Amino acid sequence: MRIVLVGPPGAGKGTQAALLAENLGIPHISTGDLFRANISQGTELGREAQRYMREGNLVPDEITVGMATERMAQPDAEDGFLLDGFPRNIAQARSLDKQLEEAGLALDGVLDLEVPEEEVVRRIAGRRMCRKDSSHIFHAEYSKPAVEDVCDVCGGELYQREDDSEETVRKRLEVYHQETEPIIDYYREQGLVVTLSALGAVPEVTQRALAALRSGDAA
């Protein structure tokens, strides 16, 4: 099964992608992981990407597509994959279609995780990180520490990352609406999209998505 997972920042794509891939027995391919891996391994694509990033420029689509294409060609992805963070725009979506078509393959479905915009802001802007250990994460509403601004685990100071400020979150949403959201209509015209509510407990959302895939609603 070959699936694309889309949704706004804060929809829980990374969490759901990992769980869905495990349930379906296919690799979870994250563009963030691909960038980090290619840069750390010093691949040609990684070096090119790093050059653009150092200059403060966006990495061109062809580099992102190249990384994703190489990953999808690996043996563990022969029977399918779940793409998370790719494609991010129409140009990348068309490139993906072309690559799959040349390989005699096609997508089976596109899962669109839907979350109200104010909930996205609430989820991300309320997040608090521990300065001693970034894996210790709390939330101002959903997972409060026993003592305000103090990590329950190690006693470190809790703080809000600059990327998590409400202003930054709303800017990220604007970029999503302008660049990524159009691919939903692009895939909808192909009859591939199923839109799912990403509200509720993590296991509930996972089961919702699996039910849609197994019933064929995402194809």
Image (cartoon, grey):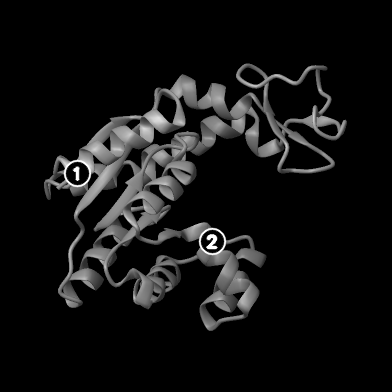
In the image: residue 63, left or right of residue 25: right
In the image: residue 44, left or right of residue 162: left
Q: From this view, report whether residue 36 is shown above or below residue 83.
A: below
What number is the disc on residue 33? 2
Name the amino acid type tagged 1: Arg
Where residue 188 sits: x, y (%)?
Answer: 17, 43
Where residue 75 sits: x, y (%)?
Answer: 36, 77
Q: Nearer the viewer, residue 81 or 183?
A: 81
Calculate the distance from the C-alpha at mark 2 to the C-alpha at mark 1: 27 Å
What number is the disc on residue 99? none
Q: From this view, report whether residue 192 is shown above or below residue 117.
A: below
Q: Earlier in the sequence, mark 2 or mark 1?
A: 2
Look at the numbered discs 2 and 1 and tell me whether their residues touch, using CB distance below 8 Å.
no
Q: Quadrant of residue 43?
A: bottom right
Where residue 48 sits: x, y (%)?
Answer: 55, 76
Q: From this view, report whether residue 97 is shown above or below residue 122.
A: below
Q: Residues within 10 Å of mark 2 (few under 14, many from 20)?
A: few
Provide the secondary structure element on which disc 1 rests.
helix
Q: Residues within 10 Å of mark 1 (few under 14, many from 20)?
A: few
Q: Quadrant of residue 111?
A: top left
Say which quadrant the N terminus sits in.
bottom left
Where residue 95 sits: x, y (%)?
Answer: 28, 67
Q: Nearer the viewer's eye, disc 2 or disc 1?
A: 1
Residue at point 80%, 32% (across, down)? 153
Q: From this view, report whether residue 40 is shown above or below residue 146.
A: below
Is residue 52 in sight in this rendering?
no
Residue at point 21%, 58% (across, down)? 107
What number is the disc on residue 214? 1
